[in-house]
Image: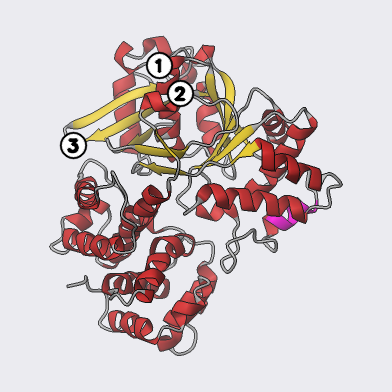
């Protein structure tokens, strides 16, 4: 054991961690029964914690094999730590840190492709969860289906040994699973997409249908009867981990943690109750199982995620750095409330969902000064997020003859940034080129890039966006 390893969190150093900060379960008693694609900070601060609480309440050996899709940084952080990491809850009265013990192994999707394929085929694995962000699904902006011309999808369909796309990994894993005996399994998208279960099912099936596999029809038939795609809603604000967060964790644990994550006190998980096989007793950890998650999904996408994106783009234009900075401005809370009041008109009435109370809770969560949630992080990948967060309610409200001034403000705030600064977006170059030629036509071009031809042809909407763009970056009044 090296000197460095004696200072770092691992199974060997776990006894040095204060008892109140150790996992409530025995990490050594777990085995990989869940595969998670996209083991970033959000999963480690959300589903992994629910799984640990369910394990502590009911057992079952529910360990998680976490898979990173691109960067090896999570592998490099967690593998030397035997999958252990800490979660720090950023409470207004001070942080609370503890070790999480549910991750049994950490893989890189292509470097460890053989192991990933073995796990996906194993009958011991009965749940596969995903947090790969909207862009990880490789969807066609116009159709919502699989982008067959995407380089990652195209190369996977050509038969590369270790698929690099999520659709390719799942399709290959299900094929291997069928060949190994066909044990049922549930694939659970935990990303912020409307109807995420149905979306995932469509993409996996479209990938398989596009292959040259001689057993593709048999595979598709088997999926129909043996693979479930529950819809889900997940909610917790998880800021990017900072060096300060890592120092906070090290002080609490008395050992260093390269995989530390943080999150707000609020957390929610709603799941459609249509699982095909065994799963953890998540309900014991506070998960809500319902026949239909869509009302919760729409409320989160259109209110929380939608207002998050709006204040991120407005905040960047005003020199703010964090969500709490925006809420501390004279216009921040008013903007959130006005936007939510407008977007809420597109939501169906739902028993048990108190929208005024939900909006109040959003304001409180956004204003939490302990979160330090950087708006630059929220602003990433706007072209992937905006269609469901803003464009869907915009269509519905305008079809109903309702005014949409805050949604027009939102579009203008995003459009202004595509013009004025480099973007962290997979379509950044296309968005920049939308400003070539007369700038008055840029809003139409941007909407068409998002697959919103109908909104691009909405003369009144375009006039409202232009009016917001012309005076420069100003908050709504």
Report the residue marked by disc 1. Answer: 57
Sequence-first disc among 2 and 3:
3
Q: Which residues are magenta?
A: 153-158
Residue beneath the point at 25% across and 59% down:
320
Please tell me the numbered disc located at residue 281.
2
Sequence-first disc among 1 and 2:
1
Give left or right: position of 252 versus 222: left
Residue that extends furthest to the top in the rendered view of this protein? 15
Q: Give yes or no for residue 208 being in the magenta stretch.
A: no
From the top left corner, tell me how far across and down residue 408 is, in percent.
Answer: 32, 74
From the top left corner, tell me how far across and down residue 182 is, in percent.
Answer: 74, 31
| As drawn, 341 above or below 373 | below
Q: Locate residue 397: give its quadrant.
A: bottom left
Q: Nearer the viewer, residue 427 or 445?
A: 445
- Tag 2 near tag 3, CB within 8 Å: no
Q: Identify the secondary structure beneath mark 1.
A: helix
Sequence-first disc among 1 and 3:
1
Please tell me the numbered disc located at residue 92.
3
Q: Quadrant of the C terminus?
A: bottom left
């Amino acid at each position: 054991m090296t000197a460095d390893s004696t200072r770092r969190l691992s199974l060997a150093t776990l006894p040095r961690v204060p008892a109140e900060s150790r996992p409530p379960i025995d990490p050594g008693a777990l085995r990989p029964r869940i595969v998670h694609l996209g083991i970033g900070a959000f999963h480690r601060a959300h589903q992994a914690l629910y799984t640990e609480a369910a394990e502590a309440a009911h057992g079952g050996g529910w360990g998680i094999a976490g898979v990173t899709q691109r960067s090896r940084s999570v592998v490099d952080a967690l593998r030397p730590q035997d999958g252990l990491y800490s979660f720090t809850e950023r409470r207004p009265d001070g942080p609370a840190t503890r070790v999480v013990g549910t991750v049994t192994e950490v893989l890189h999707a292509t470097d460890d492709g053989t192991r990933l394929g073995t796990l996906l085929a194993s009958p011991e694995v009965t749940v596969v969860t995903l947090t790969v962000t909207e862009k990880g699904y490789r969807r066609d902006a116009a159709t919502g289906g699989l982008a067959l011309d995407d380089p990652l999808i195209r190369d996977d369909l050509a038969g590369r040994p270790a698929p690099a796309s999520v659709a390719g990994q799942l399709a290959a894993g299900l094929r291997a699973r069928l060949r190994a005996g066909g044990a049922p399994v549930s694939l659970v998208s935990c990303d912020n997409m409307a109807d995420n279960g149905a979306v995932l099912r469509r993409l996996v099936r479209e990938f398989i249908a596009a292959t040259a596999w001689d057993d593709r029809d048999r595979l598709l038939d088997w999926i129909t009867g043996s693979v479930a795609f529950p819809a889900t809603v997940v909610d917790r604000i998880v800021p990017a981990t900072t060096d300060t967060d890592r120092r906070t964790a090290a002080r609490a644990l008395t050992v260093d943690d390269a995989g530390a994550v943080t999150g707000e006190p609020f957390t929610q998980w709603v799941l459609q109750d249509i699982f095909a096989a065994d799963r953890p007793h998540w309900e014991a950890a506070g998960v809500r199982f319902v026949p239909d998650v869509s009302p919760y999904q729409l409320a989160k996408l259109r209110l929380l995620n939608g207002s998050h994106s709006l204040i991120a783009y407005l905040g960047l234009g005003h020199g703010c750095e964090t969500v709490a900075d925006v809420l501390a401005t004279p216009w921040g809370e008013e903007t959130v409330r006005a936007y939510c009041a407008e977007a809420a008109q597109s939501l169906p009435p739902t028993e048990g969902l108190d929208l005024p109370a939900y909006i109040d809770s959003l304001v409180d969560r956004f204003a939490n000064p302990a979160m330090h949630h950087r708006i630059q992080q929220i602003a990433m990948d706007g072209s992937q997020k905006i269609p469901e967060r803003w464009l869907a309610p915009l269509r519905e409200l305008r079809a109903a003859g309702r005014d949409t001034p805050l949604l027009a403000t939102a579009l203008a705030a995003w459009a202004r940034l595509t013009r004025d600064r480099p973007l962290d977006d997979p379509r950044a170059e296309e968005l920049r080129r939308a400003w070539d030629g007369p700038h008055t036509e840029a809003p139409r071009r941007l909407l068409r890039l998002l697959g919103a031809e109908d909104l691009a042809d909405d003369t009144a909407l375009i006039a409202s966006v232009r009016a917001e763009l012309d005076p420069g970056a100003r908050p709504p009044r």
